[in-house]
Image: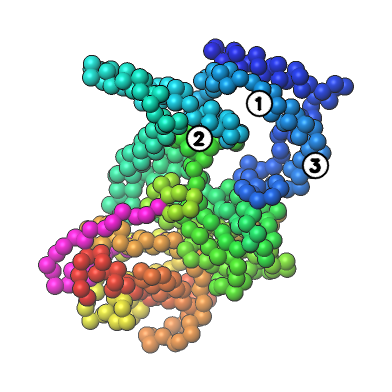
Amino acid sequence: MATGRGRIFQQHWLGLQTLLEPSGGGGAAPGRARQVPGRSRVFGFRKGPGVKFSAGSAALRCHGRDGQHWESSFSCYSGLLDRMPSEILLKIFSYLDAVSLLCTGCVSRRFYHLANDNFIWIGIYSTAFSATRSNWKVNSVEKIAMSMSFLSVQDKEAGYWKKEYITKQIASVKAALADILKPVNPYTGLPVKTKEALRIFGLGWAIILKEKSGKEYIMEHVDLSINDTSVTVIWYGKNWPCLASLSTLDLCGVTPVFTDWYKTTTKHRLRWHSLIAKYNLSHLTESTMIGCDRLIRIFCLHPGLLVGLWKKEEELAFVMASLHFHHLVERSTLGSATIPYELPPHSPFLDDSPEYGLHGYQLHVDLHSGGVFYLCGTFRNLFTKKGNIENGHVKLIVINLKNNREHLPLIGKVGLSWKTDIFDGCIKSCSMMDVTLLDEHGKPFWCFSSPVCMRLPGIPSDGPSFLGQMYSMDYVDVEGRVHVELVWIRETEEYFIVNLVLYLSVAKINHWFGTQY
């Protein structure tokens, strides 16, 4: 910024620093006040009275120690900038890039209006999207259109070209997403380059914890593991807000406003929040507890969220989200901070087969935790019949209880791994389940990723008896239900899946295939 044409801004900046330089060798204090220590994943809350940080007491101590000097420095800066003529400020702003200009507009009301200047933004727009940037030769009609655009700058309302620039940037992101996610894996029915898309767009995830008073605490993810068909995202820290004061938790995808800006090293960058799901924390301890160990209890919230509470204090220990790859990139980038991404409308594939929509299914199921897979199986040519429709669901048998040749073992000791800043552990009989069900055309019909746990069956099975303790594992949502029966073989110390059944919603089948079952 201080090189080339930006020399005028350098002179003003050095002048401000000279006026504010403290005497007596205390020049290091402002620098310490500006650099708040703490983990990069934690931001603090967005609105409400006061300023808090979730990064620990060090940040609060730094704020308290140098607060008076910082306030006096800020007021001095503000006074000098307020007295600076608008023409000089506009000249300085003209050397900023789009991201810096957007940040500048957040400083004050005056800066906001100046940073909306159409002459500045049309220059940024023409540089970014000019036809001369491409390999195509610019014809005379395009040159005339470009000159007419510059002549009509004064006729547009303030901020017009800023909106045009941002709109075109968003459109380019959508086009790039569609291009990257176009190739599909024939075995999973999911985009081949999902992992590449996560990297290219600098995609991350954040949770927004909202207190009943209106305060919001924002935390970026601390760790994640990318699986075959899902990603597991983890948040933990030492300074969680009090659970009793929290009302909701928002899970959001976080991406840089401009896709090529994630490569920069700065932490203070403009990012776009896309709401994925909203959860109610008011009655968390009354929801379904799926497991525990000597330190924590874990609770499952639909869809796919796991909340760990310390047993002793009944306070937050960690949050874990399991996100299926199906439309994950779109849901994490194309929604807004308050409205989730809406899936495109589905058009049924019409067929005159008498049992259309009841055959040709393909299932891919994973059981895993912490990068360790206990089961990874694919089942093809699954079918059912009209006679298996009962209570609004269609029964689809994947592993038959009465057919020993279909029974499958789970590899390793099943358990859900967790960790915090201080402790880690593994909760037995719990894991993450990823299900991807494709229709006969190879399109994803039903997909989810969620925590599950093994429980003792409430009702004895009507099938054959096994030499071992029986367990069941279930998942339910509006589109269907998964029921798994397992037997523990003590001699070999392993679980065997002896029954796996899907119950598909008839309403979902009718909507998807255009049938009337």
Task: Reply above or below: 416 against 407.
Answer: above
Residue 246 locus on image (x, y percent): 63, 62
Q: Depth check: give the residue in front, 83 or 204.
A: 83
Q: Depth check: give the residue in front, 27 or 320.
A: 27
The secondary structure that dominates the magenta segment is loop
Q: Secondary structure at mark 2?
A: helix
Split into 4 quadrants, where in the image is the C terminus?
A: bottom left
Q: What stretch of residues is rendered in magenta? A: 341-367
What's the residue at 49%, 43% (across, down)? 272
Residue 302 is covered by the magenta coloring? no
Earlier sequence position, callout 2 versus callout 1: 1
Badge 3: few (under 14), some or many (20 or more) residues near its Cα, within 10 Å?
few
Q: Is residue 50 left or right of residue 90?
A: right
Q: Which mark is residue 262?
A: 2
Split into 4 quadrants, where in the image is the N terminus?
A: top right
What's the residue at 21%, 78% (across, down)? 386
Quick check: can you spot residue 111?
yes
- Name the kind of residue labelled 2 in the image: Tyr
Furthest-left residue in this view: 352
Quick check: can you spot residue 496?
no
Q: CA distance from mark 3 to mark 2?
A: 32 Å
Badge 1: few (under 14), some or many (20 or more) residues near its Cα, within 10 Å?
some
Residue 346 is covered by the magenta coloring? yes
Q: Depth check: give the residue in front, 197 or 256.
A: 256
Residue 279 locus on image (x, y percent): 53, 63
Q: Is residue 371 left or right of residue 15?
A: left
- The residue identified by callout 1 is 82
Residue 158 appears in which quarter of the rendering? Answer: top left
Q: Is residue 408 left or right of residue 344?
A: right
